[in-house]
Image (cartoon, rainbow, N blue to C red):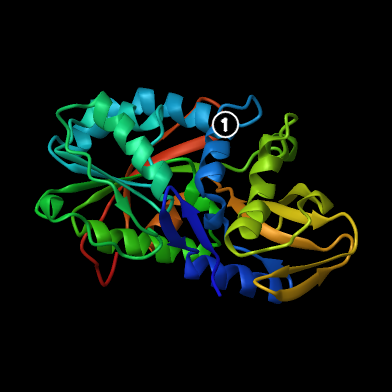
């Protein structure tokens, strides 16, 4: 039976997709759970804290790129588009874009309902004349946008190099789903992290203060809370490694000792040193990101980077399909 959480008199069933991914993830070899389940309320708060860490360069770098690029983005996209953000807007990057492009509406999409509503309320207060229309959904699949924005031209916004959390074929599927959601003729502004030295990459995902470790371990806390788990969280440690062959940082939860536990009364065990693979963060070479976008149905039309070339922001357009170049 799914665990029921009772808060303020409301009864909420655990997400069946979360349940399926967790049970399948622990039963498979190697063990793995999709990274999207990091983002319950606590996970979303921890990720916001991660973005402010000195080791976590992506947020600072992308924010500076956007400050310099958004005027040009506005000129290329034109006024009056509905800005559709895949993932709840942050208090730093999203306002930079909204102030520049003068949108007709803002539609944030996120799987974490509580965090979505809070961030939407903050942006609605900051932009009192702008219709803010949050959509609680998994943006990995095509989404029906609010009817009021259907006739408007769209500008998708996907910052933070979140595209890197997916393996390449899943990234292509996501980009194609975004094209379906936004429609032909829409534009997409997307951030992509670049390949760089291993020390910098690993430090960004294994900070000295242990915030990323808490973010990773919170997934186990969520399983215990929502799925009646008995996982001994203290018996795990956070690991971040650079997989050069696949050009990605991998996050794992490693068992410190032999353990046994249950999830919804189903027994599981792990031996010391065994891991649960929880996240990938793929990094892209100078041309890789453009190839990925084209494979997903998007034609790059402009690109901006920081002076060191550590991060890229690309504007792409959903052009009609062509049989030949």
The answer to whether residue 143 is left or right of residue 239 is left
Residue 205: tell me if it is visible: no
Quarter of the picture containing the C terminus is bottom left
Viewed as shown, does residue 74 lie left or right of 283?
A: left
Residue 325 visible in the snapshot: yes
The structure residue drawn at horizontal position 30% and vertical position 31%, both measured from the top left corner, is 123
Q: Nearer the viewer, residue 215 or 317?
A: 215
- Are there few (<14), some (14-19), or many (20+) residues within 10 Å of tag 1? few
At 87% from the left and 54% from the top, the residue drawn is: 256
Q: Position of residue 168 (x, y in %)?
A: 52, 62
Q: Is residue 27 above or below residue 218?
A: below
- Between 108 and 305, the residue placed more toward the observer is 108
Total marks drawn? 1
Depth check: give the residue in front, 79 or 194. Answer: 79
> For the N terminus, which image quadrant?
bottom right
Foreground of the two, 249 or 51:
51
Q: Which element is circle 1 on?
A: helix
Quarter where residue 210 is shown: top right
* Residue drawn 14% across the image and 28% down it: 129
Snapshot quadrant of residue 119: top left
Q: In the rendered view, does 177 fall on the left or right side of 40?
A: left
The image position of residue 164, as x and y in percent, is: 53, 51
Residue, disc 1: 49
Residue 318 sits in which quadrant? bottom left
At x 41% / y 45%, what residue is drawn? 114
């Amino acid at each position: 039976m799914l665990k029921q959480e009772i808060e303020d008199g409301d009864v909420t069933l655990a997400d069946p997709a979360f349940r399926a991914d967790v049970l399948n993830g622990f039963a498979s070899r190697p063990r793995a759970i999709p990274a999207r389940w990091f983002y319950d309320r606590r996970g979303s708060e921890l990720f916001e804290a991660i973005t402010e860490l000195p080791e976590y360069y992506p947020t600072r770098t992308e924010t500076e790129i956007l400050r310099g690029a958004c005027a040009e983005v506005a000129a290329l996209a034109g006024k009056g588009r509905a800005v559709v953000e895949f993932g709840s807007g942050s208090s730093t990057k999203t306002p930079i874009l909204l102030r520049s492009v003068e949108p007709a509406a803002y539609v944030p999409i996120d799987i974490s309902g509580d965090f979505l509503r809070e961030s939407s309320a903050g942006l609605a207060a900051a932009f009192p004349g702008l219709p803010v229309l949050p959509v609680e959904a998994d943006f990995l699949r095509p989404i029906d946008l609010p009817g009021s924005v259907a006739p408007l031209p769209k500008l998708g916004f996907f910052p933070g190099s979140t595209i890197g959390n997916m393996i390449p074929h899943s990234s292509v599927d996501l980009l194609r789903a975004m094209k379906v959601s936004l429609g032909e003729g829409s534009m997409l502004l997307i951030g992509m992290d670049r390949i760089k030295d291993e020390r910098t990459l690993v430090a960004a995902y294994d900070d000295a203060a242990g915030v990323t470790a808490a973010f990773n371990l919170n997934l186990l806390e969520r399983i215990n809370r929502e799925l009646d788990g008995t996982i001994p969280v203290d018996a795990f440690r956070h690991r971040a490694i650079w997989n050069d062959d696949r050009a990605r940082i991998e996050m794992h939860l490693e068992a410190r000792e032999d353990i046994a536990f249950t999830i919804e009364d189903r027994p599981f065990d792990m031996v010391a040193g065994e891991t649960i693979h929880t996240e990938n963060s793929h990094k892209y070479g100078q041309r890789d990101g453009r190839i990925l976008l084209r494979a997903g149905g998007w034609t790059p039309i402009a690109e901006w980077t920081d002076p060191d070339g550590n991060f890229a922001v690309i504007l792409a357009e959903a052009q009609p399909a062509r049989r030949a170049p």
